[in-house]
Amino acid sequence: MLRRPLLLKIFDAANMQRWNDKIRPVELRELDKQAHKMVIAYLIGKFEENEEGFDWIEVIEGGLFEFLQRLVVTDLKPQIFYRIKEDPTRYSQLNKWVYEQLEPLISPLGDDFCKRFTEYFAGTRETLNRRILSAAHFYATKWEFDIIERANPNGYEIPKIKKDLQKKQEKYYDLKGMQQIALYPKFRDFIDLCGELRFQLRWSHINRVPKTSVLGHMLIVAIFSYLFSCEIDACRKRRVNNYFSGLFHDFPEVLTRDIISPVKRSIAGLEELVKEYEREQMANEVYGLIPEAWHGEMRMFTEDEFSNIVTVEGRQVRTSSDEITQKYNRDEFNPRDGELLKATDELAAFIEAFLALNNGLASQDLQDAKNRLKDRYKQKVIAGIKFGELYADFDV
């Protein structure tokens, strides 16, 4: 079961600065890098999903395991980390130590999850799914470096880093997704547009610690949604849909900015108007950047993100999370728990407020939001998840 220590540990990535030995025109944080990486992994993976050996679950879990590893080895400079990685014995020792640090946090998720975590880093074979993650990691790093280079054109190590990145890029040209990104500007534009959500801060009217971007928040919701899905023994397609619905659920905010709920609800009909505008802008600005065959899935992730949906006889049907568990928890129904996603989204918001208050920020807005969300979920059980118990964890 997902518990408070792991929930808080995941938020540590919002404090982790990247490229902190270089001049940075903007703050670059680990949480945002990991979120951008998984968006890029989605793009590359969509071009590979019909290939032998491809598995969305392995892509999602591999990304999660690498993220958790990064939370522990944050103080290692990349050059040192990759040197260790080249030595199987030392890398095995490092990962054993990483697991020892994480085991108290992830053990409540069950023995199977812990076993998959250790086996992932014990594996040495470079599968298609690992290559997709590696390529996405590379491209997200290169995206950041392009920003750094503009601020440090003649800086120490800049030419060497640039040369290393150019060499690495050639390693991934066998992947269809990387070929498409290199050939077509629209796919690079999609990645850039998602990247803009790194610079949109949540609760932007309040000075919080840690600050979380819209993109970082989206990854947190995706991770929480996936872990909850595992907890309720969701089918594979349900886990994948819940994860990517979390990863893209606030994507339209790149076109509208982050409008906080009290503002949306302050005028009758404003929330519906914002939704309508988001749909229009997605059609005008976003769908042209991805293949038409993906549009239906992206609409589910971004425009109808909080609805419980299954597909029955080729038609999308709305239902409840409980009914999905009882009747539709099979891949053939392509289920997605919007109700669970909404609860996860608000849990992430609660923790953002909790952390800011615990870090010494005196804000009545945050205190009110924290109390309101806690009261809302005090008695709620959604898809079998007892949210009241999770919120009660934060009383300790």
Image (cartoon, rainbow, N blue to C red):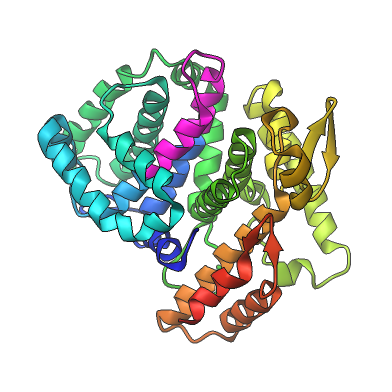
Q: Nearer the viewer, residue 321 or 245?
A: 321
User: Is residue 254 placed above or below 125 in the rendered structure?
Assistant: below
- Left or right: 105 with respect to 301? left
Q: Nearer the viewer, residue 296 or 187?
A: 296
Residue bounds of the magenta highlight: 41-65
- Indicate yes or no whether the magenta region holds residue 114: no
Q: How many marks?
A: 0
Q: Is residue 207 visible?
A: no
Q: Is residue 14 visible?
A: yes
- Left or right: 332 with respect to 100? right
Q: Residue at 20% across / 54% down in the picture?
A: 75
- Left or right: 344 with respect to 91? right
The quarter in which the C terminus is drawn is: bottom left
Q: Residue at 51% across / 49% down in the picture?
A: 223
| Residue 154 image-quadrant placement | top left
- Left or right: 82 with respect to 29? left
User: Is residue 287 placed above or below 126 in the rendered structure?
Assistant: below
| Residue 380 image-quadrant placement | bottom right
Q: Residue at 70% across / 47% down in the picture?
A: 337
